[in-house]
Image (cartoon, helix red, strand yellow):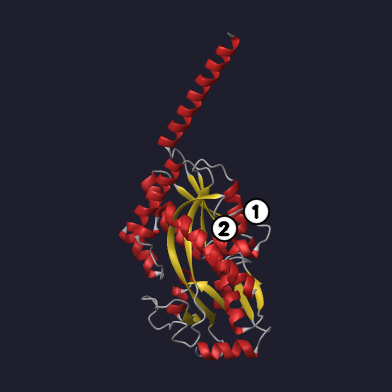
Amino acid sequence: MIKNLVGALLSAALVVVTAGAAQAQSDYPKRNIVMIVPFAAGGPTDVVARIVSEHMSRTLGQTVLIENVAGAGGTTGATRAMRAANDGYTVIMGHMGTHAAAVALYPNLAYKPDVDFEPVGMAAGTPILILAKKDLPAKDLKEFVAYVKANNEKLNMAHAGVGSVSHTTCLLLSSILQVKPIAVPFQGTGPAMNALVGGQVDYMCDQIVNAVPQIQGGTIKAYAIGTPERSPVLPDVPTTTEAGLPQYQASAWNAVFAPKGTPKEIVQKLADALDKALDDPAVRKRLLDLGSDIPGKDRRGPQALGTLVKNEIAKWTPIIKANM
Ligand code: MLT
């Protein structure tokens, strides 16, 4: 008798809890959403996050608040996001560094990018540029290569922390050139760019969205872009292939992730809001003017991002292990 009563009470409780969870999902979002940017404000990850989150806020009817959590090449912020409640109220703007290269660069990484997150969707592809301070003597990439080799171990190469995109893609450059510059870490390539413009560091490999204004303004030098085609917003910057360094091919991507276990219905609402942002003409103009590659429909959404993360881990792990 008692057993039946306990059983009935338990199943009633289960019904209440399930109904509550279903209600929470269908009411989502009922309050602000935090989007962690794992680097300092003003860098490429921050810029892409603020552009898309502003439009997502309108679609979701709640503010998507940017929270910059810098450190350890973005893995501090990514770990914070992984440990957040999986209720849809914390997401992260991650990228090729935090959710692919970091696996090979941090043996004790607190998270597995392809296991501990729910992929929401890719936001922007970001070609990599080889950049230098305005008064570096080299006039083109060939002279830059010679200069870096001649001044090996004396030049300051800026990056955003071990495992960041700027760190990984310039380590690739260093391994191709067989040089060991002085690696100067910053909390993001926003502050690093200030140092490059100020001449405090010599060169950097950075995502195009962080460099277009400075290149167009002539406050830094851009020797080449690491993609097969030139960027339409930087028509005078040659590809690495045109400039004589075809083996240097480098581009990154920024994407939104939620903690593992975030309900599928909520992940889909976030993915739909990101999709709408990427279809909005004003958002597209801002991203394209900064040289971003906006993913087509086939490259958007949770499934495509899940596949991208696995492929990028598989791509960068052997490169990093072989060259660093
Ligand atoms: C990086 O990985 O270099 C980051 O994108 C830098 C940043 O966003 O500040």
Disc 2 under 8 Å from ligand 1? The reply is: yes
Q: Quadrant of the N terminus?
A: top right
The label nearer to you, 2 versus 1, is: 1
- The label shown at residue 38 is 2
Q: Residue furthest left?
A: 281
Q: Is residue 202 visible?
A: no
Residue 19, position in %: x, y?
45, 27
- Report the image quarter containing ligand 1: bottom right
Residue 313, position in %: x, y?
55, 63
Work out how far the residue at label 2 is from the one at label 1, CA to CA, in angstroms: 15 Å
Seen at 36% across and 47% down, the residue is 59
- Mark 1 falls on what kind of element? loop
- The label shown at residue 306 is none
**Amino acid at the residue labelled 1:** Ala
Q: Residue furthest top?
A: 1
In the depicted view, which residue is nearer to us: 246 or 292? 246
Counting residues from the start of the chain, the first of labels 2 and 1 encountered is: 2
- The label shown at residue 110 is 1
In the depicted view, which residue is nearer to us: 309 or 197? 309
Q: Write down the quadrant of residue 123 in the picture.
A: bottom left
Seen at 65% across and 57% down, the residue is 109
* 218 w.r.t. 206: above or below: below
Q: Quadrant of the C terminus?
A: bottom right
Instruction: Please tell me how crowded label 2 is: few (under 14), some (14-19), or many (20+) other residues with Cα within 10 Å.
Output: many
Instruction: Please tell me how crowded label 1 is: few (under 14), some (14-19), or many (20+) other residues with Cα within 10 Å.
Output: some
* 147 w.r.t. 194: above or below: below
